[in-house]
Amino acid sequence: MDNLLEKNERYGLKHCLPALESLIRERKTFFANPTGNAFYFNRALQDLPELTPSSVSLDSSKILIGSRADADDQSYKRLSENLFRLCPWRKGPFQVFGVDIDSEWQSWMKWDRFKHVLPDPAGKKILDIGSSNGYYMFRAAAFDPLLVLGVEPQHSFYYQYLALQKYLGLDNLSCIPAGFERLPAMDRYFDLVFCMGILYHRKSPIEMLAQIKRMMRPGGMLVLDNLVLDSAADMCLFPESRYAKMRNVFFIPDLKCMQSWLKRAGFSSVSCVDVSKTTKEEQRKTFWIQTESLADFLDPLDPDHTVEGYPAPVRAVFTACA
């Protein structure tokens, strides 16, 4: 969080600095004396060994930090144990000094679906909403952006990001452990925004899209990944209670409805660049999570439907211009 304020001149944050300082100060106060799960994750972070990577690869399906040869046996064991204490690892995969973190999601599959349409990230200011452990932030960092800012309210994911950054030390990345709605007005600031797997958790999706647009420079690009119905009837599903066992899924639009939402929010040049059914190759249970995954969310007798009887998860990637 600190480098945002330290590099204010470089990042051009003067117009939102007081509100941003207030938010960061509040978050720093909490994390200075964390409680509950945050205390547990903070202990794991503090117990990580001091290691220096001999090499780093960010532009690869599995983000590589150092090698097994960089850590002696005692450090390797300590590293593996404390990275595991930060479970569940949803996004990835990563290899950290030889420790393979086989995440629930093979996040490179999603990245590959839209990377060909991204503007050159070099020198750009990028926002990743719901950034999790920073997988997409790190992938973007491979192309030398001016700033990649993540916002992530889940403590476990934030500490995973801190653990990875401990060894990467990328000074153009920063993450604020808070929800998107806590960000101050950063009007016309970001060149590129990632909003992936977030919108269907919002009760007011168009309001969120409009807020995102206000934060973007004219001509900037939004990359939006969302659950969809694979149709073009301009319809939307509102689950009665749960969808794929998730309580916090509110609106799942079809392809035309999603385009309508983006246009209503003021975006232009809306394009659907990919539609993919979620498979067990992309999302599955591994040693690095202790919860259910895709196979548990689908009807075992009819995997084209969720356990509630709704269409099985299909995700689409849209791009749109501010």
Image: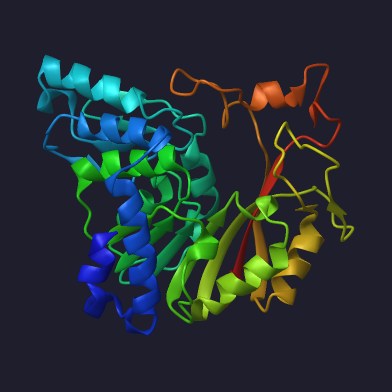
Q: Quadrant of residue 142?
A: bottom left
Task: Where is residue 88? Give x, y as percent.
Answer: 46, 29
Q: Is residue 280 above or below residue 310?
A: above
Q: Nearer the viewer, residue 198 or 64?
A: 198
Q: Nearer the viewer, residue 68 or 210?
A: 210
Q: Is residue 245 above or below residue 169?
A: above
Residue shown at the point (41%, 66%) measured from the top left:
126
The C terminus sits in image quarter: bottom right
Residue shown at the point (35%, 30%) measured from the top left:
40
Task: Where is residue 218? Give x, y as percent.
Answer: 52, 83
Residue shown at the point (65%, 27%) measured from the top left:
294
The N terminus sits in image quarter: bottom left
Q: Is residue 117 above or below residue 243?
A: below
Task: Where is residue 8? Give x, y as percent.
Answer: 25, 75
Residue shown at the point (27%, 31%) measured from the top left:
43
**Residue 124 visible in the shown view:** no
In the image, taking residue 144 as reference, residue 298 lies left or right, namely: right
Q: Nearer the viewer, residue 67 or 242?
A: 242
In the image, taking residue 254 as reference, residue 18 lies left or right, namely: left
Task: Where is residue 173? Give x, y as percent.
Answer: 30, 58
**Residue 157 visible in the shown view:** yes
In the image, taking residue 176 as reference, residue 295 lies left or right, namely: right
